[in-house]
Amino acid sequence: MAYRANQQLREDIWDYRYPSAPAPLPDEEEEKVVNFARQPAKGPGTTALSLMQQATEMFEGIENQARETEARAQSLCKSATERLRLAEKQRDASERARRELINDFNARLEEMAKAMQRAEKRIVSAEDHAIGAEFRAQAAEAQLHKANRELAAIEDMIRKRLV
């Protein structure tokens, strides 16, 4: 492991002392790649300044990307919040409709129960009237039988006197 690290360090130093020209990149790839190729040594100050400029550009790109990502995340949060509010409103509306439906159903059930009670009272009253009418009919029938017997007795008496 140490050998590989030392070998890599040697190659980096070699590349620093003897820079080679980088291979040309297509236009799209050039925009995405930061050029860290070594410039011909003009002095330690210019090389450091150049590296600082490249690092600054790279950090600015990262910051811009972070801002865009944050803006997208905020937009997604705002959109999700609006969808949640809309869903809550729909839930509340359906809950109100359900309560109204249940209240209407309960009111109808109560009306039907009262109507059944009134109908039961009318049925009981009609049964009482029917029983009373039946008793009166039986009494009238008994009186009719009695009257028929008395009439028959009177006819017999009249026949006995006439004959």
Image: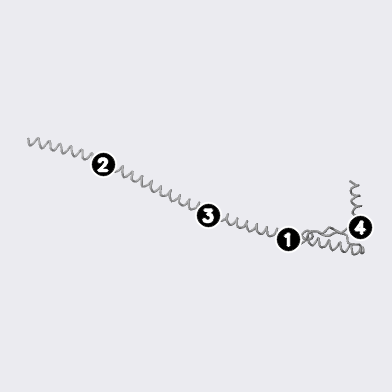
Residue 134 occupies which quadrant of the picture? Answer: top left
Residue 44 occupies which quadrant of the picture? Answer: bottom right
Q: Which residue is mark 1?
A: 68
Q: Nearer the viewer, mark 1 or mark 2?
A: 1
Q: How much space separates mark 1 and mark 2, taking CA atoms?
A: 101 Å
User: Does residue 90 appear left or right of residue 47 in this picture?
Assistant: left
Q: Amino acid at mark 3?
A: Ala
For label 1, count other residues whose C-alpha is less than 10 Å away and answer few (under 14), some (14-19) or many (20+). Answer: few
Q: Which residue is mark 3?
A: 97
In primary-sequence order, the first of circles 1 and 3 is: 1
Most foreground residue, 29 or 45: 29
Q: How much space separates mark 1 and mark 3, taking CA atoms?
A: 43 Å
Q: Nearer the viewer, mark 3 or mark 2?
A: 3
Q: Nearer the viewer, mark 1 or mark 3?
A: 1
Q: Amino acid at mark 4?
A: Tyr
Q: Nearer the viewer, mark 1 or mark 4?
A: 4
In primary-sequence order, the first of circles 4 and 3 is: 4
Dots 3 and 2: beta carbons under 8 Å? no
* x, y percent for residue 4: 89, 48
In primary-sequence order, the first of circles 1 and 2 is: 1
Q: Residue furthest left?
A: 163
Residue 63 occupies which quadrant of the picture? Answer: bottom right
Q: Which residue is mark 4?
A: 18
Helix, strand or loop at mark 2: helix
